[in-house]
Amino acid sequence: MADRPLRADAQRNRRRILEVALRAFSEGGADVPLDAIAREAGVGSGTLYRHFPTREALVEAVYHNELGQLCESADELLATATAQEALRTWMGGFLHYARTKLGLADALGVLIASGANPYEHSRARILAALTELLEAAIVEGSVRDDLAPFDVLTSLSGIALASTDPQQHERLLDLLVDGLQRRPAGLSDSAGS
C-alpha cells in the first residue's frame, strides 16, 4: 500500500506541508510545533502525521525534498538553456540549497541525534548533477576542460560558508563562473609574467 502513488490532492498536501515546514524549521528552529505547521499548510494534524509520522521524518523529508529539487534541476536546465547558462543557474540553486541547509541546522541536528544520517548520499547526488552540467558545458566549449567537479563543489561550498548575504553570493558566484570559462587559445597562466 505504501508504494501506491499519492492522489493529486494528497500530493498537493504533502508539497504544501514540506514548503511550510521548510520555512518554519528555518525560521523557528527544530521545536516548531507540528500542529502549527499543519495549520499554516491548511491541513489537519492527521494529514501531516499520515505523511510524516514523526518530527524526524518531516525534517528528513524537507531536507531530501530540497536536495532532490536541486539535483533533478540539472536535466531540466540542460533541456531549456545553454550548458553554460544551465550551469550558472544550477550553481545559484546550490547556494540557495546551502542557505536552506544552514537554516535547517537545528532541525537536522535533532535528526542526526536520533541516529539518522540525512547526508548519506547527498554529496554523491550533488556531484553527479554538477558533473553532468560541467561535462555538457565542456562539450559546448564554454568552460575549461580541466575542471574537477569536486573542486567546483568545494568552491561553491566556500561561497556558501563565507557569507549569508545573497547579493554577495551572486557576486562571488560570478567570479567563480568567470574562472571556469574556457581561455582563448594562446593564453596561459604565465601570460602576464
Image (cartoon, grey):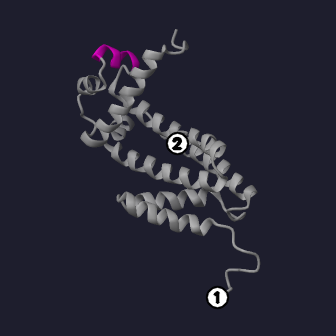
Which of marks 1 and 2 precedes in the sequence? 2
**Picture coordinates of residue 34, whole percent (x, y):** 27, 26
> Residue 70 has which mark?
2
The residue to which callout 1 is attached is 192
Q: Is residue 115 visible?
A: no
User: The residue under label 2 is which amino acid type?
Assistant: Leu
**Picture coordinates of residue 14, whole percent (x, y):** 41, 23
Q: Which residues are magenta?
A: 44-51
The alpha-carbon separation of the residues under discs 2 and 1 comes to 39 Å
Question: What residue lies at 34% left-to-right and 23% top-to-bottom?
Answer: 54
Question: What residue lies at 45% left-to-right and 46% top-to-bottom?
Answer: 97
User: The residue under label 1 is which amino acid type?
Assistant: Gly
Q: Quadrant of the C terminus?
A: bottom right
Q: In the displayed image of the protein, which residue is found farthest to the top? A: 1
- Position of 60 with respect to 193 (left or right) is left
User: Can residue 60 be found in the magenta stretch?
Assistant: no
Q: Is residue 93 visible?
A: yes
**Label 2 packing within 10 angstroms: few (<14), some (14-19), many (20+):** many
Work out whether 102 lies above or below 48.
Answer: below
Viewer-proximal residue among 142 and 129: 142
Q: Secondary structure of the magenta portion, mostly?
A: helix
